[in-house]
């Protein structure tokens, strides 16, 4: 069997009127192992935590098992409510959630994630969703939408991309927080001088504009760089451009 092909699914209704797709239990483990063999672990993969949310226990455990074998940590949840009860933020991480589940859907989860300012990326996986539903999910903030049946390779690529984005975003957020904290430690005079220094103004011009001596400008300049944690005027200018100074 070609390991690149999608895992076989069957459909059933659990008596609640919702028609769901399921991995065929008799073949899921062998196919998962074949997928793993076809896509060996790479040192370039983004290790992280994956929250797997699906009311299909077979699918949850299959994906979780494969992810753990590839170095990821996982937690599995059978509903949106159970996920939020157990949620502990981790970096980097990603939420892999089924679109259609009883009680609360994947979109309900995404709305709550946004309301609570949770930065973890959300990937949808669904066997019955329509194109408009996928578009709605992406507009609401999902980073990817995967239609079942899908190969594990497709799922793993989407997870790896999301983890990379979350890691980069978290690093940027941390760097911004550190810069803001350091900028707030500057005195009013140092902040005033900071703008001149970042623009590459000469010592003499700064001294004239601020009405202070050139040696005093040099002292303030050295203090600004030290407090900001910048090794050069170029780095200071870059940080001011990236993070700005218009914050409380």
Image (cartoon, rainbow, N blue to C red):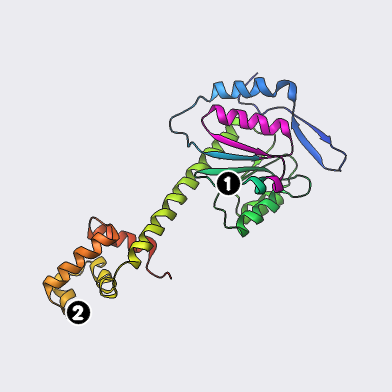
Which numbered disc, 1 or 2, marks the residue that appears first in the sequence? 1
Which residue lies at the image location 60% right of the left edge and 21% below the top edge?
34
**Which residue is nearer to you in this view: 205 or 58?**
58
Between circles 1 and 2, the one closer to the viewer is: 1
**Residue 57 falls within the magenta-colored stretch:** yes
- Could you say where residue 124 lies in the image, as x and y percent from the top left? 65, 44
- Could you say where residue 118 lies in the image, as x and y percent from the top left? 57, 54
Q: Picture quarter containing residue 79?
A: top right
Q: Quadrant of the N terminus?
A: top right
- Could you say where residue 215 lies in the image, as x and y percent from the top left? 11, 71
| Mark identifier at residue 187 | none
Secondary element under disc 2, as helix, strand or loop, is helix
Image-based side of 211 in relation to 112, left or right: left
**Which residue is nearer to you in this view: 69 or 107?**
69
Specify the segment rendered in magenta: 53-82
Image-based side of 46 in relation to 80, left or right: left
> Neighbour class for label 1 at 10 Å: few (<14), some, many (≥20)?
few
Q: Is residue 213 above or below residue 61?
A: below
Which residue lies at the image location 28% right of the left edge and 70% below the top edge?
195
| Mark identifier at residue 88 | 1
Q: Is residue 215 above or below residue 53?
A: below
Image-based side of 231 in relation to 114, left or right: left
Q: Picture quarter containing residue 136?
A: bottom right
**Residue underneath mark 2:** 209
**Which residue is nearer to you in this view: 137 or 25?**
25
In whole angstroms, how far apart are the C-alphas of marks 1 and 2?
A: 52 Å
């Amino acid at each position: 069997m070609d390991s690149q092909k999608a895992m076989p699914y069957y459909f059933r209704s659990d008596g609640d009127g919702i028609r769901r797709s399921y991995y065929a239990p008799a073949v899921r483990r062998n196919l998962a192992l074949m997928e793993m063999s076809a896509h060996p672990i790479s040192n370039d993969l983004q290790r992280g935590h994956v929250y797997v949310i699906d009311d299909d226990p077979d699918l949850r455990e299959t994906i979780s098992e494969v992810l753990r074998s590839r170095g990821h940590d996982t937690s599995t949840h059978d509903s949106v409510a159970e996920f939020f009860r157990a949620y502990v933020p981790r970096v980097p991480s990603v939420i892999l959630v089924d679109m259609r589940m009883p009680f609360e859907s994947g979109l309900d989860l995404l709305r709550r994630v946004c309301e609570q300012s949770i930065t973890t990326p959300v990937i949808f996986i669904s066997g019955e969703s329509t194109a408009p539903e996928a578009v709605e999910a992406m507009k609401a903030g999902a980073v990817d939408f995967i239609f079942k049946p899908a190969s594990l390779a497709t799922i793993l690529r989407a997870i790896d991309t999301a983890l990379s984005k979350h890691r980069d975003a978290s690093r940027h957020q941390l760097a911004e927080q550190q810069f803001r904290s350091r900028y707030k430690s500057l005195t009013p005079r140092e902040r005033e001088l900071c703008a001149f220094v970042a623009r590459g103004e000469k010592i003499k011009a700064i001294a004239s504009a601020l009405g202070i001596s050139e040696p005093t400008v040099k002292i303030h300049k050295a203090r600004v760089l030290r407090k900001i944690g910048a090794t050069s005027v170029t780095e200071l200018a870059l940080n001011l451009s990236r993070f700005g100074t218009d914050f409380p």
